[in-house]
Image: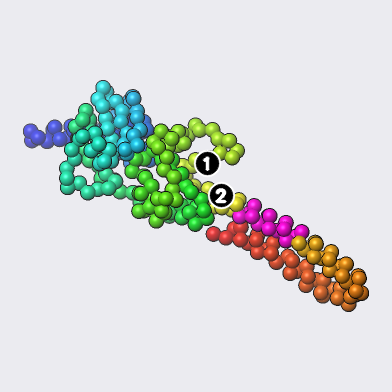
Amino acid sequence: MCSFFPIRSAIFLALSVTASLLDAAQTALAKPFLRLASDSYAPIRPVSDLVFSDAGGITGVVDGRRIMVGTASFIQRAWIKIPPDIKLKTAVFCVVDSELIAIFAVKYQVTPKADYALNLLEDNGYMPVVATRDFNVTASFIQSRFGVSSSDVVYPPADLRVAMSDQTLTLDADGLIVTYGGSDAVAEALISCRRYRTSSRLSIIFSLLSSIIGLLLGLLMAYFGWAEAAAPVNMLLYYLLWAVPPFVFACWVNRF
């Protein structure tokens, strides 16, 4: 019984400071940790001196204590030893005042919408920019979970990702699109707009060609006296054939 209370106290502290730091950082991991902290009656505390690291973690000060939350590599770079038998690639490590006090096992689930959106963008020549504050979601993570090559994904430095994922960010008309949901709709909208532009241009080109060729045929028919070639059936067939390309382009725009 003597060792039970210190262990319980350490877990309580780890839940409190980890949830507080992730919540202050506005990461995707905040929601499950906040729920876990609430179930354990661990309070959410104010955080100051919040810093995002490119090494894969976040640091801050909670109640005068320096807190580090991040990946194994982030903790090891701070010269803090971790158990050698820990093989969890997406584990969350919590350090309080240079002492490792907790390791949380985290498992990510691939949502069909996110998988569909990322692969749709990659297949159509778009390069997604990963503007996430979650230190586990990296270019290599996306490659392993979604099958999207890391070379086809832009993973900016931590400071830039934080700025890009700011919910108060204002954008120009031709600026960056930042979304926290509905990624499949955004991907389809981008690709549909590009297809619509291409379809419109090709339709105009074919319309111009149809007009030019029709004018040349009319001149030839008048010059050589091919009046019988201007039969109603032939003219109808001519216009129907030139109506096929725009119809095909229109169907191509909404094809996914």
Coordinates of residue 144 in the picture (x, y in percent): 35, 53
Residue at 53% over, 40% down = 176
Is residue 203 highlighted in magenta?
yes
From the viewer's perspective, is residue 16 above or below residue 230?
Answer: above
Give the dominant element type of the magenta stretch: helix, strand or loop. Answer: helix
Q: How is the image coloured?
A: rainbow
Drawn side of residue 156 relative to residue 4, left or right: right
Write the residue at 86% across / 73% down: 230
Q: Position of residue 206 (x, y in %)?
A: 72, 61
Q: Magenta stretch?
A: 195-208
Q: Which label belongs to residue 38?
A: none
Quarter of the image with the C terminus is bottom right
Label 1, residues with CA under 10 Å away: few <14, some 14-19, many ≥20? few
Residue position marked by numbered label 2 in the rendering: 190
What residue is rendered at 70% in x and 66% in y?
A: 244
Q: Earlier in the sequence, mark 1 or mark 2?
A: 1
Other residues around mark 2 within 10 Å, as few (<14) / some (14–19) / many (≥20): some
**5 above or below 109?**
above
In the depicted structure, whether residue 27 falls above or below residue 222: above
From the viewer's perspective, tell me whether residue 95 is left or right of residue 216: left
Q: Which residue is mark 1?
A: 177
The Cα–Cα distance between marks 1 and 2, rounded to whole angstroms, is 10 Å
The three-letter code of the residue at mark 2 reads Leu
Q: Are marks 1 and 2 in contact (CB under 8 Å)?
A: yes
Residue in the picture at 69% in, 64% down: 245
Element on which disc 2 rests = helix
108 vs 75, nearest the viewer: 75
